[in-house]
Amino acid sequence: MNQCYCIVVLLGLPASGKSWLAGRLCSFLTENNCIVNCATFDTIVSLEKQAEIAVSSSSEITKHYRREMKDTVESFLKVPNPSSKKCVVIVDDNNYYRSMRYEYHQLAAKFYTGYLQIYVKCEVSEALLQNNSRPQSSRVPDIVITQMNTKFEDPCEAWENSLTIGHIDLNDTEILNKIWNYIQNAVDSPVSTLKTLEEKKLASEQSKLRNDHNIFHNIDKVLRKRLNQCIRERKEEKDARVLAAQLNDTRQSILEGIKTGAIAIPTDILKADGSIDLSILEVWSISAFIQRCPL
């Protein structure tokens, strides 16, 4: 369990300022006594290769490099942290599909870490302008930017825990402090918390199913007992077989009504601790039987 870890996923168009922010963030976090690792897509895939991928019809090449990025991030998470320092893993990539981001969210769930997205929002015209001002050696082909802009999926799901930063905000002196606050909150509320809630919900549902089964079983026991008592009391008045059949039809109609929801069981049959109050159950079951008994 990596309770002091946080995965910070950057997303945005090429030349939006993600790598510049990643560099500043690495320095800032290190100064704040954090252990920082950064996985950068541009170091795994050359700009020339990225241009080929952008115009390629095959998705397998992209998947291969994305897996390599994910493996790099996972390798950072596998390193034990014996200290009390916060460990931040920055994912410097475009992450333009939500499914790409979700893979890192799954890693956060797997390693019980915090998770944060930082969306560096930038208009395609700004990204192209910024890209053209770069040195030729670090310039992304324009087609990569324009193609990605048509595919980009803005963060909108609750699990994304996303902070949106405008391109102009990158020069704000307080932006790093704001991100730092978000990271600390993410560390304090790891994805494992959500996982635990889901597990608790499942356990609660399973417990309810067990209680429902136990309630049904106990009601049936009470009805059978009452049925036998009626037969003993009235066997002289009526043919025992006819009487038993009629009473059994009443019992089955009550049980069927409970199954379908046509007959509502009183909520106070269950105690506050979730156990069954057998005395209330017995009184209600006998009353339901008497009301519907044809005799």
Image (cartoon, helix red, strand yellow):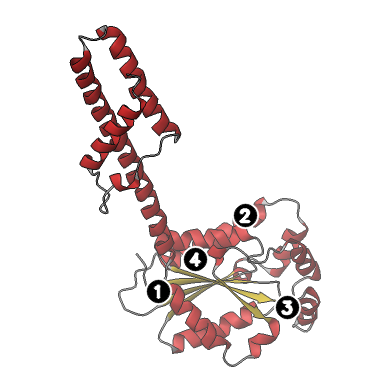
Between 9 and 216, which is closer to the camera in this rendering?
216
Quarter-of-image position of residue 272: bottom left
Disc 2 crowd, CA 10 A, few/some/many (<14, 14-19, 20+): few
Q: Residues within 10 Å of mark 1 (few under 14, many from 20)?
A: some
Q: Earlier in the sequence, mark 3 or mark 1?
A: 3
Task: Find residue 188 and name its label.
Answer: 1
Q: Which residue is mark 2?
A: 63
Q: Earlier in the sequence, mark 4 or mark 3?
A: 4
Residue at the outermost bottom position: 173
Q: Earlier in the sequence, mark 4 or mark 1?
A: 4
Kind of residue at badge 1: Asp
Identify the residue at the far front of this view. 237
Quadrant housing residue 279: top left
In the rendered image of this protein, does residue 42 appear above or below residue 172?
above
Quadrant of the image containing the N terminus = bottom left
Q: Name which residue type carries label 3.
A: Ser
Pick whichever of labels 3 and 2 is earlier in the sequence: 2
Residue on which disc 4 sits = 73
Q: State the residue at coordinates (23%, 10%).
A: 237
Task: Work out whether mark 1 precedes mark 2 in sequence or the reverse, and give the earlier one.
Answer: 2
Circle 1 SS class: helix
Mark 3, residue position: 137
Alpha carbon distance from label 1 to label 2: 32 Å
Q: Earlier in the sequence, mark 2 or mark 4?
A: 2
Q: Amino acid at mark 4?
A: Val
Q: Is residue 169 left or right of residue 253?
A: right
Tag 2 secondary structure: helix
Q: Nearer the viewer, residue 229 or 98?
A: 229
Question: Looking at the image, do the residues carrying marks 2 and 4 touch, with CB atoms under 8 Å apart?
Answer: no
Give the secondary structure at mark 3.
helix
